[in-house]
Image (tube, rainbow, N blue to C red):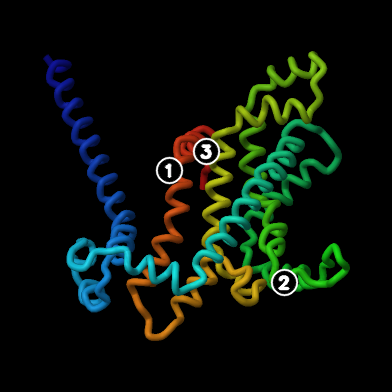
């Protein structure tokens, strides 16, 4: 009798716990989606007065009134959005692609090779993770301003490679790759070595295809970090030729009179690529977070 009574009670508690978990998840989803909903709804409102009036009420989340793509058209035709978008896409894509290759190679060497100073190098990489970029921004700026071009001119400022090369090597990405590689079974690699394959062939043909979860994690984190970066472009870029989206938006946001519909449209178009990247890679991103344990 006691067992019979306890089973429904336990099932009821599990049901309430599950409902509470779903309710908490729903609240969190709404909490994080509200700013995006506000952004995209405001970007679609063509009436500036209506937009300003709705900002102080729940109507800011309701698409009604003059709904059109007029704000997006103003941004594309009346600002340097297209140039800034191309610059951001080029610099961030190259940084992510080269970063995945370079950081994974270094991490694979640390995970598989035994050499003098390996533990010290690992300690340095872990230590570099906790150093904020703001602490090295000014020394890095002074350094790149003294580096030579291929034609012999001095100074990398106001260029594409000043926004790419300093950010290819990334301590946290190396650490994520390293943690993933040391957990990979070595059986396939040892079999490939016995068949005559070299380490580079093993890395490219065996290790990297098995590393899709951590590659997706590194790519998403690096993309988000570089896509929204404002500090370095403000310091290293002059003018509109090499300006990225955050820098162009700062200039666009500073115009007077300020048109909030255009500002929201600019921000919405700048946000779309990050949402698309996460949607595409979320399956591998979540798998990596669960398996390798990105722990605080």
Secondary element at tag 1: helix
Secondary element at tag 2: loop
* Residue at image location 37% in from the left, 72% down from the top: 262
**Residue 233 horizontal side relative to residue 114, left or right:** left
Depth check, mark 2 against mark 3: the one in front is 2
- Residue 72 in percent (x, y) is at 37, 65
Depth check, mark 1 against mark 3: the one in front is 1
How far separated are the C-alphas under marks 2 and 1? Answer: 34 Å
Which quadrant of the view contains residue 61? bottom left
**Location of mark 3 (residue):** 293
- Residue 296 in percent (x, y) is at 51, 48
* Residue at image location 61% in from the left, 42% down from the top: 176
Sooner in the amino-acid sequence: mark 2 or mark 1: 2
- Label 2 with label 1: CB-CB less than 8 Å: no
At label 1, counting other C-alpha atoms closer than 10 Å, the crowd grade (few under 14, some 14-19, many 20 or more) is few
At label 3, counting other C-alpha atoms closer than 10 Å, the crowd grade (few under 14, some 14-19, many 20 or more) is few
**Residue 97 horizontal side relative to residue 245, left or right:** right
- Residue 289 in percent (x, y) is at 50, 39
**Location of mark 2 (residue):** 157
């Amino acid at each position: 009798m006691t067992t019979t009574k306890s089973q429904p009670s336990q099932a009821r508690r599990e049901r309430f716990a599950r409902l509470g978990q779903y309710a908490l998840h729903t609240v969190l989803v709404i909490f994080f989606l509200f700013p995006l909903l506000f952004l995209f709804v405001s970007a679609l409102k063509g009436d500036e007065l209506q937009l300003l009036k709705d900002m102080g009420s729940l109507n800011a989340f309701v698409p009604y009134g003059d709904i059109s793509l007029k704000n997006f058209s103003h941004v594309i035709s009346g600002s340097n959005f297209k140039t800034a978008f191309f610059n951001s896409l080029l610099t961030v894509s190259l940084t992510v692609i080269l970063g995945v290759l370079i950081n994974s190679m270094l991490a694979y060497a640390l995970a598989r090779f035994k050499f003098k100073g390996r533990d010290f190098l690992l300690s340095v990489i872990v230590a570099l993770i906790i150093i904020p970029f703001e602490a090295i921004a000014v020394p890095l700026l002074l350094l790149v301003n003294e580096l030579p071009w291929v034609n012999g001119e001095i100074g990398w400022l106001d260029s594409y490679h000043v926004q790419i090369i300093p950010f290819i090597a990334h301590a946290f990405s190396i650490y994520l790759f390293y943690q993933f590689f040391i957990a990979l079974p070595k059986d396939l690699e040892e079999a490939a070595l016995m068949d005559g394959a070299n380490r580079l062939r093993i890395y490219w043909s065996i290790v990297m295809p098995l590393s899709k979860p951590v590659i997706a994690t590194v790519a998403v984190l690096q993309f988000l970090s570089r896509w929204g970066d404002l500090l370095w472009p403000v310091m290293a870029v002059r003018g509109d030729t090499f300006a990225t989206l955050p820098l162009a938006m700062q200039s666009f946001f500073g115009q007077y009179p300020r048109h909030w519909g255009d500002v929201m449209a600019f921000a919405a178009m700048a946000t779309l690529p990050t949402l698309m990247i996460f949607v595409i890679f979320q399956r591998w991103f979540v798998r990596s977070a669960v398996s390798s344990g990105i722990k605080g």
